[in-house]
């Protein structure tokens, strides 16, 4: 990938800006500053930390248009969705500001002996965050906000294709009044990541990204006995039971698959339809997907822009071509668009079998796989036949039946008659190869916390 961080417009392929990685000496300076700041930041009164988080939220709202335009340029997110992401980030910082005192209050324990005991929630030290490009601000906020509240300090390595977004977040932290060293952006290499994790002053790492990256980081973190949280890939099932409202279900399936160009770990990637509903669903779903046309991401009317890069188009095309060569049926799409932009048609595949890569690998783009099954039990088995276990959706007229299905799915999150949507007060995370740990809600504060017992006889 080279040694630099680059802003490349995915609509035109034009290189807009380039940043060089920092030196090892600068990495050492950043670790030292984060460690020194940690001693002061954890001692800062909670009310002050809360005040600064609330100010960060204000700044995201004040700078919404500028911040949104940056990620539209860098990774092609349609501008309306980009503004919504900035608003979500502001709500996350507000959420932790509003709930900080409650989350960090001492917990008194019921004990058998005399006296009393309680557990305090305390920070553990500087943390490294390794974040992806698909939601450049949101992924950082769900890691940084709870840990800044707690009193940890942040070293942040962002994706190589959104450096201007990374710098903007660092500037907001500084503009809000966070002390020097509390939040630091780092343009670094994977080798420098390993060196940071080997440093005793750094106490943990949170990564959102690919399974391969997560495995590599977990290996290094484990070798150095560092706590880690991993939010990795997903191949979320979208289960359709008998008797559903077909119009509502098809609209949800299209939105669940196509939001952010299908470049979301919680996108609805595997649609599993029970029984006779299959034909009617497919008859409505295929033209609805085909009707989603790519456009200029700076246009507020655009809902589907380019993928993040030409390499992303290459990867999704390779998976689709492999499936079709192996016998899958291409119902619509399956082609790149002519021109310099990183555009790929909305695509629907049926007849995907376990021998095809598309059956088990994550389809990170505008490609849906639709399966037909004969029973609810078969739907559950197929939904669970995945190395991933992040999110899922279950659509059914009978809520009790839908919930019974949800309880048997091996995932970290399930939505009934709705698609995955993140909110500050909902925990986010998965099982199996989708990762380890949870973010957001109160769980986001507790991953990198010292739950200290204090016993008073």
Image (cartoon, rainbow, N blue to C red):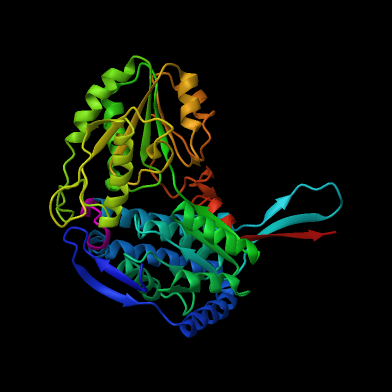
Residue 450, quarter of picture:
bottom right
Q: In the rendering, at what x and y percent does residue 337 appear?
A: 16, 47
Q: In the rendering, at what x and y percent does residue 292 appear?
A: 18, 39
**On the rendered structure, is 95 left or right of 319?**
right
Answer yes or no: is residue 393 visible: yes
Residue furthest out toward the top: 276
Q: Residue at x 44, y 72 (%)?
A: 189
Main secondary structure type of the part rendered in magenta: helix
Q: Which quarter of the image is occupied by the C terminus?
A: bottom right
**On the rendered structure, is 354 left or right of 296?**
right
Q: In the rendering, at what x and y percent does residue 133 appear?
A: 35, 59
Residue situated in front as seen by the camera: 31 or 52: 31
* On screen, residue 315 above or below 221: above
**On the rendered structure, is 318 left or right of 393?**
left
Q: In the rendering, at what x and y percent does residue 216 appear?
A: 53, 60
Q: Residue at x 22, y 59 (%)?
A: 10
Q: Residue at x 48, y 79 (%)?
A: 27
In reply to whether residue 75 is colored magenta, the answer given is yes
Point out the stretch of residues depicted in magenta: 73-80
Q: Which quarter of the image is occupied by the N terminus?
A: bottom left
* On screen, residue 403 above or below 420: above
* On screen, residue 8 above or below 261: below
In reply to whether residue 262 is colored magenta, the answer given is no
Answer yes or no: is residue 93 visible: no
Residue situated in front as seen by the camera: 247 or 27: 27
């Amino acid at each position: 990938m080279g040694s630099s961080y680059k802003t490349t417009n995915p609509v035109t392929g034009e290189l807009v800006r380039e940043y060089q990685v920092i030196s090892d000496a600068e990495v050492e300076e950043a670790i030292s500053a984060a460690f020194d700041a940690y001693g002061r930041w954890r001692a800062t009164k909670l009310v002050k930390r809360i005040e600064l988080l609330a100010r960060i939220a204000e700044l995201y709202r004040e700078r919404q248009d500028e911040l949104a335009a940056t990620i539209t340029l860098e990774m092609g997110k349609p501008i309306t969705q980009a503004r919504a992401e900035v608003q979500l980030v502001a709500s996350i910082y507000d959420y932790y500001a509003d709930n900080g005192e409650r989350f960090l209050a001492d917990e008194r324990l019921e004990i058998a002996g005399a006296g009393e005991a309680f557990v305090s929630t305390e920070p553990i030290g500087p943390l490294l965050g390794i974040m992806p490009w698909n939601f450049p601000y949101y992924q950082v906020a769900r890691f940084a906000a709870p840990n800044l509240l707690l009193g940890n300090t942040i070293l942040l390595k962002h994706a190589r294709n959104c450096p201007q977004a990374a710098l903007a977040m660092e500037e907001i932290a500084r503009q809000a009044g966070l002390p020097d060293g509390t939040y630091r952006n780092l343009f670094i290499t994977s080798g420098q990541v390993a060196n940071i994790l080997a440093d005793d002053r750094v106490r943990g790492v949170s990564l959102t990204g690919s399974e391969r990256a997560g495995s590599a980081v977990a290996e290094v973190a484990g070798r150095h006995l560092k706590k880690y949280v991993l939010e990795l890939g997903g191949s979320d099932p979208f289960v359709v039971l008998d008797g559903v409202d077909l119009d509502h279900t098809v609209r949800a399936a299209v939105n669940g698959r196509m939001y952010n160009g299908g470049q979301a770990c919680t996108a609805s990637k595997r649609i599993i339809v029970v029984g006779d509903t299959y034909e009617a669903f497919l008859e409505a779903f295929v033209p609805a997907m085909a009707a989603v046309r790519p456009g200029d991401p700076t246009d507020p009317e655009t809902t589907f822009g380019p993928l993040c890069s030409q390499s992303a188009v290459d990867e999704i095309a390779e998976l689709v071509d492999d499936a079709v060569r192996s016998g899958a049926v291409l119902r619509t799409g399956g082609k790149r668009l002519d021109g310099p932009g990183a555009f790929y048609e909305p695509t629907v595949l049926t007849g995907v079998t376990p021998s095809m890569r598309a059956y088990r690998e994550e389809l990170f783009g505008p490609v849906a796989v639709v399966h037909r099954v004969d029973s609810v039990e078969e739907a559950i088995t197929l939904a669970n036949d995945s190395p991933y276990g992040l999110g899922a959706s279950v659509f059914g007229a009978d809520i009790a039946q839908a919930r019974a299905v949800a309880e048997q799915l091996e995932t970290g999150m399930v939505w009934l008659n709705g698609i995955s949507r993140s909110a500050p007060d909902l925990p986010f995370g998965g099982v199996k190869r989708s990762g380890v740990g949870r973010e957001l809600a109160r769980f986001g504060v507790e991953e990198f916390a010292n739950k200290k017992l204090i016993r008073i006889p």
